[in-house]
């Protein structure tokens, strides 16, 4: 059998470029590759269908929404390797790009649309599909003008954790060699580690200070508690995020859990609620206000980028027919700006027609108001979603959608749309925005993967629309079947936690109750102060919004990354150790993502092999031991690089 030549990303793939330095992708910009083929499109569509159905089932049934990009990349690599496909790496990027729409479209749909059923209001299949489809199309079109800024101009300044892990899977799988062995070994270790936690409960997924007597008393009286996820995937994510951003994110969490929640307890004179409930019902809204304000600050700071994108659009419209620009490298070819602008115009017209004549609102005036909400919020927060994904690999789309629902509800009530009709309108508007932001956030990951590998952006952008369309039809069909089979209310109903939260927020607003403006204002004030202190406000606000148990292990992973990359005075050796650690972290994420799907499927099938009594009695006490073993493995394996590099 023919041995593949080992592949790896260039040394400057994940660091800022020096003056005059250029990043050269794996696939040469001067050559053409078979990227879009009947094989890559067909497999991509099949992946979109399969993972949209799986993600919708699992997200609504067990409350777990998984990101499909990494499992799809693993399957794509296996298939092209087994079939010995020529240009397998180029085709796998397209497969992953089309199939990866599943996770983002599913998140946009199941976060909002089931709330319509929960509130006892009817909605038809046509309305659900259009909400997801039009939102996804808008998200793609709004993001494309910012591609060069995020993937090229900010090269090496953002960690892009999910894009890093997916790219390592694609590259190592294509090239084989020691990199592939390291990735596979870490994937097996991380996957089995997380599978044992989720499926058998051999040790607790989260350890808390409440496991000790003093910690339980502190949580009960002062509402002070610390929690940490012990999973391999989250640890790997922290390694790729790095110490700087993971520390800022964790500081946001610590402010909420060690200061704000105990302070709320003191102000209210001692409450019966657990710290977790205070966070969910109150403190988390501070994070939402912080994210929204940090987003606005980011928009103001990136005004020059928005201005340059607009200038490019105007210049293309003014260009005389037949005029030719300088030749652009294949790896820098985007869809023509004229096409993007006309696409946005057509998409907005379709959204207006959908609102006005699709039974969403009562009249043309209300349809115009709804269109304005969608256009403004989707455009402004596209960059926020992309920033969040680039920094921490997690899109705060639920927080931004919640803010959208509040704004939409208040505005719709002001223009006379209340009650059931108002709730349907607000949720459909929220569904469009939620899908737009979710798709935009995941799409920047695809484009960064393509940038590192050397794909043609224009092809990724064009075929992304097919993935969104297929995923929208699939997820809405699954949702319709699940509603008729299980329902979203009642004893045996599906969990749908995000949609239940949206329903709980929107119902009082449509009946005249207010929103937690004070909490949003506190978050906004914190973001403004941070900006004046030159502290990145968005990652800090993400820390306030994301539960602390997911943020503390990020710091551990970031600290490992710093440790292994600073042990030697030899810069080349440090870089080699850092790269090997990145492979291990990517393996943890890939293995955890893949086995997380398997574990969730077993739960969905009611396969109960969880050691409930053991886990309750000893789970947290035992968990720290395998977690420390995982940390030790990551450190020693990263430091153990071939001696040839040291010379």
Image (tube, grey):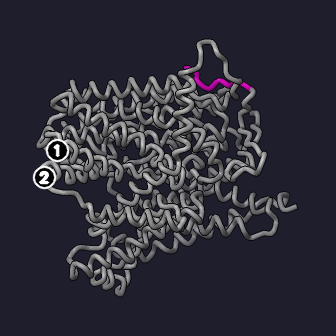
What residue is drawn where x is 26% and y is 73%?
274
If the image is split into quadrants, where does the N terminus sit? top right
Relative height, residue 199 to residue 115 (above, below): below
**What label sits on residue 512 in the rendered view?**
2
What residue is drawn where x is 37% and y is 64%?
523
**What label sits on residue 413 in the rendered view?**
1
Quarter of the view holding residue 150: top right
Quarter of the view holding residue 488: top left
Callout 2: SS: loop
Is any atom of residue 90 visible in this view? no
Measure the alpha-carbon separation of dots 2 and 1: 8 Å
Give the magenta range.
Answer: 31-38
If the image is split into quadrants, where does the C terminus sit? bottom right
Callout 1: SS: helix
Give the percent coordinates (x, y) of residue 159. Answer: 59, 54
Magenta span: predominant SS is loop
Relative height, residue 49 to residue 20 (above, below): above
Say whether marks 2 and 1 touch (CB < 8 Å): yes
């Amino acid at each position: 059998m023919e041995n593949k030549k080992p592949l790896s990303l260039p040394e400057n793939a994940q660091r800022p470029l020096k003056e005059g330095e250029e990043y050269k992708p794996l696939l040469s910009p001067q050559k053409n590759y078979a990227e879009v083929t009947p094989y890559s499109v067909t497999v991509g569509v099949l992946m979109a269908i399969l993972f949209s159905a799986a993600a919708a089932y699992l997200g609504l049934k067990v409350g777990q929404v998984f990101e499909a990009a990494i499992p799809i990349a693993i399957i794509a690599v296996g298939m092209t390797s087994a079939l010995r496909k020529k240009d397998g790496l180029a085709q796998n990027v397209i497969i992953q790009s089309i199939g990866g729409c599943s996770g983002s479209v599913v998140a946009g749909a199941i976060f909002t649309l089931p709330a319509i059923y929960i509130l006892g209001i009817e909605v038809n299949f046509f309305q659900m599909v259009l909400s997801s489809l039009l939102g996804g199309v808008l998200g793609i079109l709004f993001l494309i003008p910012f591609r060069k800024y995020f993937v090229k101009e900010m090269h090496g300044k953002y960690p892009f954790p999910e894009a890093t892990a997916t790219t390592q899977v694609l590259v190592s799988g294509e090239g084989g060699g020691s990199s592939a062995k390291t990735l596979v070994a870490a994937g097996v270790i991380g996957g089995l580690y997380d599978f044992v936690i989720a499926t058998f409960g051999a040790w607790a997924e989260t350890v808390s200070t409440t496991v000790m007597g003093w910690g339980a008393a502190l949580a009960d009286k002062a509402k002070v508690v610390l929690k940490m996820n012990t999973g391999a995937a989250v640890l790997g994510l922290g390694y790729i995020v790095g110490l700087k951003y993971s520390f800022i994110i964790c500081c946001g969490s610590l402010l909420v859990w060690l200061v704000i929640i105990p302070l709320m307890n003191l102000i209210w004179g001692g409450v019966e609620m657990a710290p977790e409930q205070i966070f969910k019902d109150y403190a988390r809204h501070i994070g939402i206000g912080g994210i929204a304000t940090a987003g606005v600050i980011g928009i103001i700071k990136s005004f020059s980028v928005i201005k340059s994108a607009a200038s490019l659009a105007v210049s293309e419209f003014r260009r005389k027919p037949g005029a030719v620009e300088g030749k652009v490298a294949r790896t820098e070819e985007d869809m023509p700006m004229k096409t993007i602008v006309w696409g946005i115009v057509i998409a907005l017209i379709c959204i207006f027609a959908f609102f006005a004549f699709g039974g969403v609102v009562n009249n043309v005036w209300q349809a115009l108001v709804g269109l304005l909400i969608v256009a403004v919020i989707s455009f402004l927060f596209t960059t926020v979603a992309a920033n969040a994904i680039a920094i921490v690999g997690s899109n705060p789309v639920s927080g931004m959608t919640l803010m959208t629902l509040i704004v939409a509800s208040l505005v719709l009530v002001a223009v006379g749309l209340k009650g059931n009709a108002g709730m349907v309108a607000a949720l459909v508007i929220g569904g469009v925005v939620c899908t737009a932001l979710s798709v935009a956030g995941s799409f920047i990951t695809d484009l960064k993967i393509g940038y590192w590998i050397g794909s043609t952006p224009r092809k990724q952008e064009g075929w992304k629309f097919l993935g969104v369309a297929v995923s929208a039809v699939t997820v809405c069909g699954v949702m319709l079947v699940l509603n008729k089979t299980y329902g979203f209310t009642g004893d045996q109903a599906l969990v749908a936690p995000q949609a239940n939260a949206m329903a709980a927020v929107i119902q009082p607003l449509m009946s005249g109750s207010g929103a937690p403006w004070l909490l949003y204002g506190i978050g906004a004030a914190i973001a403004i102060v941070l900006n004046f202190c030159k502290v990145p406000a968005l990652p800090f606000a993400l820390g306030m919004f994301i539960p602390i148990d997911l943020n503390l292990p990020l710091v551990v992973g970031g600290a490992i990354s710093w440790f292994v990359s600073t042990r030697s005075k030899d810069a080349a050796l440090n870089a080699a150790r850092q790269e090997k650690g990145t492979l291990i972290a990517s393996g943890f994420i890939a293995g955890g993502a893949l086995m997380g799907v398997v574990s969730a499927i077993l739960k969905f099938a009611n396969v109960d092999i969880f050691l409930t009594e053991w886990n309750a009695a000893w789970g947290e006490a035992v968990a720290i031991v395998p977690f420390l073993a995982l940390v030790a493995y990551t450190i020693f394996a990263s430091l153990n690089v071939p001696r040839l590099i040291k010379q």
